[in-house]
Image: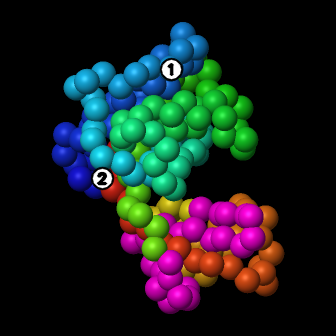
């Protein structure tokens, strides 16, 4: 089901697009139609790009809704309107957006950085009440040390602060 393969992947990307377009144009949140409900529970990240540049990315590490489709709707709207790094998406941009949906496996604690592989695993870096997350297989990130350093910076965790490391896999749908 990765890389957009399979019907569920196409359904999730289309659902994310519908959720974003409806919210931007009509200021209302959709309920996933019955034919777009993907069962099961999982954390989900929705990433939005415009001209191959990140435009928004928000997600959940663990599920907070009743099913994967509910996670997609919530996180698609948040990625389009509440990513603090970007202005909210406008109606004029909608046709230019590329959307991907990552469905996460359950995070697993790892003993050290040698258990990470940024091409295969996302990383969660946790220290005290701070948490940084980086999805796997991101352009320009080839070493686990770089992946962890970026996640630390995103969370405001110092480079020498002790951390717990978790890894997870994703099924990426584009």
How many numbered markers are drawn? 2
Quadrant hosting residue 25? top right
Residue located 44% across and 20% down the image:
30
Residue located 56% across and 23% down the image:
93
3 within the magenta span: no
Front position among marks 1 and 2: 1
The x, y position of residue 145, in whole percent, is 61, 81
The x, y position of residue 105, in whole percent, is 38, 62
Q: Specify whether residue 53 is in view.
A: no
Residue located 22% across and 49% down the image:
5
Residue located 59% across and 72% down the image:
147
Gap in Å between the C-alphas at discs 1 and 2? 26 Å
Quadrant hosting residue 12? top left
Magenta-highlighted residues: 109-133
Q: Crowdedness of circle 2 by 10 Å Cα count: few (<14), some, many (20+)?
A: some
Which residue is label 2 attached to? 3
Say which quadrant the C terminus sits in.
top left
The x, y position of residue 151, in whole percent, is 65, 67
Which of the two discs, 1 and 2, labels the residue nearer the N terminus?
2
Q: Give the secondary structure at mark 2.
A: loop
Q: Is residue 34 left or right of residue 61?
A: left
| Location of residue 166 with respect to 26 vertically, above or below | below
Q: Specify whether residue 31 is in view.
A: yes
Q: Give the secondary structure at mark 1.
A: loop
Q: Nearer the viewer, residue 150 or 167?
A: 167
| Location of residue 35 with respect to 59 vertically, above or below | above
Q: Crowdedness of circle 1 by 10 Å Cα count: few (<14), some, many (20+)?
A: some
| Location of residue 105 with respect to 82 vertically, above or below | below
Which residue is label 1 attached to? 29
């Amino acid at each position: 089901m990765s890389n957009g393969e399979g019907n569920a992947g196409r359904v999730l990307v289309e659902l994310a697009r519908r959720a974003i377009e409806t919210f931007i144009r009509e200021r209302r949140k959709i309920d996933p139609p019955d034919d777009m409900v993907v069962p099961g529970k999982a954390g989900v990240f929705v990433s939005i790009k415009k001209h191959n540049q990140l435009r928004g990315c928000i997600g959940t590490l663990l599920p907070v809704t009743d099913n994967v489709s509910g996670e997609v709707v919530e996180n698609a709207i948040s990625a389009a309107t509440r990513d603090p790094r970007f202005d909210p998406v406008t109606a004029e941009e909608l046709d230019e957006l590329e959307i991907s949906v990552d469905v996460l496996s359950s995070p697993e604690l790892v003993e050290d950085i040698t258990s990470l592989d940024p091409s295969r695993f996302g990383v969660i870096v946790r220290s005290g009440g701070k948490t940084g997350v980086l999805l796997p297989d991101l352009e320009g990130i080839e070493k686990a040390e770089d992946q962890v350093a970026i996640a630390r910076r995103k969370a405001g965790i110092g480079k020498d602060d002790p951390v717990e490391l978790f890894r997870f896999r994703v099924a990426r749908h584009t």
